[in-house]
Image (cartoon, grey):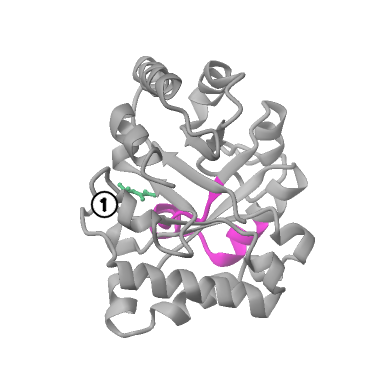
Amino acid sequence: MPKKIIAANWKMNNDEYSSKKLTFDFLKHLSKSNNENVLKILAVPFPFLNTVSKMCDGVDSVKVASQNCSSYDMGAYTGEVSANMLSSISINFSLVGHSERREIFMEKDEDILDKVRLLLENKISPIFCCGESINARKKGMHLDHIEKQMRNSIFKLDASEFKKLVIAYEPIWAIGTGETASINDIDEMHNHIRNLIKSNYSSSLSNSISLLYGGSVKPNNAKEIFDIKNVNGGLIGGASLNAKDFIDIVNSIN
Ligand code: PEP
């Protein structure tokens, strides 16, 4: 069975004070109702990784993630943060290939593969994000688009590397828009991803990978999304900035 995971993506929000407050509130709510079977991951901005990690220390079902890492391993790359640096402060997960990185910072599938490899070399599990634009969906190209994103990057890994991934399907048109993909859309895509992994690797590997859905998940729609067969959790943007909403989402998964 894939691990159930609810990951928060704080993006570039909050200063140090409000990051501590959000973490404090999250842990306070969690102490009242912690579903230990669900892994909670907080993907926080680089400057607060250490602080938030220390605050979450000792809560086994909570991990802290970075939102990105460099596609280079070390050296003269001003402003970059390497996978090795993240590993040295005990970070175990990192988002990679988020659509905002692909669209705003022009990240290509090849860059994403480099990042995935460096994360794995540094014992950090990549949370690989993929998703199609509204145009691709309107043209009926959404399934092909996701297949291409996977073939150009993570399908180049061998099975022993691939099994360490978490995959998040996030249709771009649903991110931060309040428009959630329909249950049928999510079901179709998650089945498609599961089948692609099966044909590229094996059924047992495919059935072990956690597939998360992301895109305007809120407390009022989380349960019906998490009840879909091949959905093993969610990647939550906007709603993760409110501790109570985030915990309500966490508690919506069975
Ligand atoms: C995201 O950015 O990964 C995301 C899913 O955002 P939101 O929940 O706000 O749509």
30 lies left or right of 119: left
Instruction: Tell me where residue 120 appears, x and y as whole percent.
Output: 72, 49
78 above or below 177? above
Kind of residue at disc 1:
Asn
Quadrant of the image containing the N terminus: bottom right
Q: Secondary structure at mark 1?
A: loop
Q: Main secondary structure of the magenta part?
A: helix
Instruction: Tell me where residue 119 appears, x and y as whole percent.
Output: 68, 47
Q: Is residue 106 magenta?
A: yes
Q: Which residues are magenta?
A: 95-114
Specify few, some or many for label 1: CA neighbours under 10 Å numbering under 14, 14-19, or 20 or more: few
Q: Is residue 112 magenta?
A: yes
Q: Which residue is mark 1?
A: 221
63 above or below 197? above
Residue at x 46% of width, y 51% of height: 233
Residue at x 29% of width, y 41% of height: 238
116 lies left or right of 251: right
10 lies left or right of 128: left
Residue 81 location, quadrant: top right
Residue 61 location, quadrant: top right
50 above or below 84? above
Residue at x 50% of width, y 36% of height: 40
Nearest the viewer among 39 and 128 is 39
